[in-house]
Every structure is written in structure tokens, then in C-alpha cells.
Image: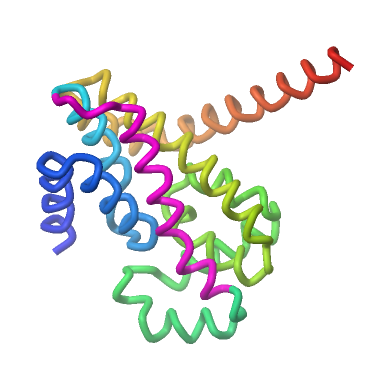
Amino acid sequence: MIENIVVWLTSLIESSGYFGVGLAMFIESFFAPIPSELILPFAGFVASRTDQVLVISILVASVCAYLGSLPFYFLGIWGEDFVNRFLKRYGKYFFIEESDVKKGFEVFERYGSGIIFFGRLIPIIRTVISFPAGVAKTSFLKFSVYTLLGSAIWSTLLATAGYLLGEQWELVGVWLSQYENVVIFCGVATVVGYVVFLIARRSRKK
């Protein structure tokens, strides 16, 4: 069933353009088995051979990924007990394991709200991190900013890779599965380095 859904989504991206990209990323945000590692590179590949604009595809993907993260955030606001009851009853339909949600709460407790941003670069965590964010009553503005930024970085990296690789766009998923930790480290290091650069530049101006 999962494979059929993925095939349908990639076909939709090819035939419906930005709408397909947006719908695929919206579903990916709360339906764990849908891999953005496949959806985004394919969206980049489609942009490379059609009149679709890569930047617009990335923006649509980022915004829709954010919108897809909101339902779990609002469920979390009702409290951890409510989340647990919801998942016991409906979690199987989203293919969300209890251990994955537990891990999401653990990393949130350990790293704080910043994991909302970095969690968008980590498979599974990006699906479940909205729950603890809501339970912790993270401000809606902070949640939105972190999720949008993290989604934008992830979407840019994967869609651009698919755009550049062209017919070999599927290699992105292969590389990520083999070097996932390295990719996450490089992505985080790049973001941290950029933030430090901005802070240093602002300090010099002052």
C-alpha cells in the first residue's frame, strides 16, 4: 500500500506540478512512511525538465510541510495523556510507533525547543516532534518559525540535489540511507556556522 501511495504522489507531482509537490509534502509531514527523501529529489528532477521553477517548488514544499505538522502540534496542546490516547487508537493508521513518539519526547526534553528546527533534518523525528512541542506549550510563533526554517533547508538540499542529478535523482535517497548521520551533521554544521557568521558580523558593525 505504501509503495502505491508513493507512486501515486510522484505521478501527481509530474502531472500536477506545484499542487502535487504541496500535497505530497503535506501528507509526508504526518504520515511517517512517505519519504521526503524520494518526494523532494523527484520534485527537483521534474523542475529540471519542465517549466516549473525550482525555487517555487521548494517554497511550496516548505510551506506545505509546515502545514502538515500543525495537526500534531495542536493535538499536543491537549496534553501528553491525550496524545497517548489518540495514538493508541489512531497511531496505527499513521504508521507511528509508540517507541518513535517516546524518542521524540526524549529528544525534546533533552534539547529543548531547538530540536523542532533540527528535527526537520532527522527521519521519523520530523514526523513526531510536533507532539512534544505542543505538550510543552511551545509558542505558536516559535514552532512556526523553527518548522518553516527547518523544512526550507531540508527541501532546498534535497530538491536541488534532484534538480542537479536529473535522471539520476534516485541516488539522493540511496546516499541519504547510507550516509544519513553525515548528512545531518553537515546540515546542522552549516546552519550553526551561518548563524555564528551573522552574529559575528553584527558584533563587528556595533
Q: How many marks?
A: 0
* Residue at x 66%, y 48% (from the top left corner): 114
Quadrant hosting residue 5: bottom left
Q: Please name whichever residue, 92 or 10, is drawn nearer the observer in this view of the structure.
A: 10
Residue 69 lies in the magenta-colored region: yes
Quadrant hosting residue 81: bottom right
Q: Is residue 166 left or right of residue 84?
A: left
Q: Is residue 55 left or right of residue 131?
A: left
Q: Return the x and y of residue 4 as percentages of the image width and height.
A: 11, 57
Q: Please identify the quadrant where the C terminus is shown.
A: top right
Q: Is 97 drawn above or below residue 108 in the view shown?
A: below
SS assignment for the magenta stretch, majority: helix
Q: Return the x and y of residue 136 as percentages of the image width and height.
A: 68, 68
Q: Is 27 drawn above or below residue 191 in the view shown?
A: below
Q: Return the x and y of residue 165 as percentages of the image width and height.
A: 23, 20
Q: Residue furthest right?
A: 206
* Residue at x 36%, y 35% (from the top left corner): 58
Q: Is residue 85 left or right of residue 91?
A: right
Quadrant hosting residue 161: top left
Residue 35 lies in the magenta-colored region: no
* Residue at x 21%, y 35% (from the top left corner): 42
The image's colouring method is rainbow
* Residue at x 23%, y 47% (from the top left corner): 19
Q: Please identify the quadrant where the N terminus is shown.
A: bottom left
Q: Is residue 47 left or right of residue 31?
A: left
Q: Please name whichever residue, 201 or 131, is drawn nearer the observer in this view of the structure.
A: 201
The stretch of residues the image draws in magenta is 50-76
Q: Return the x and y of residue 35 as percentages of the image width and height.
A: 29, 49
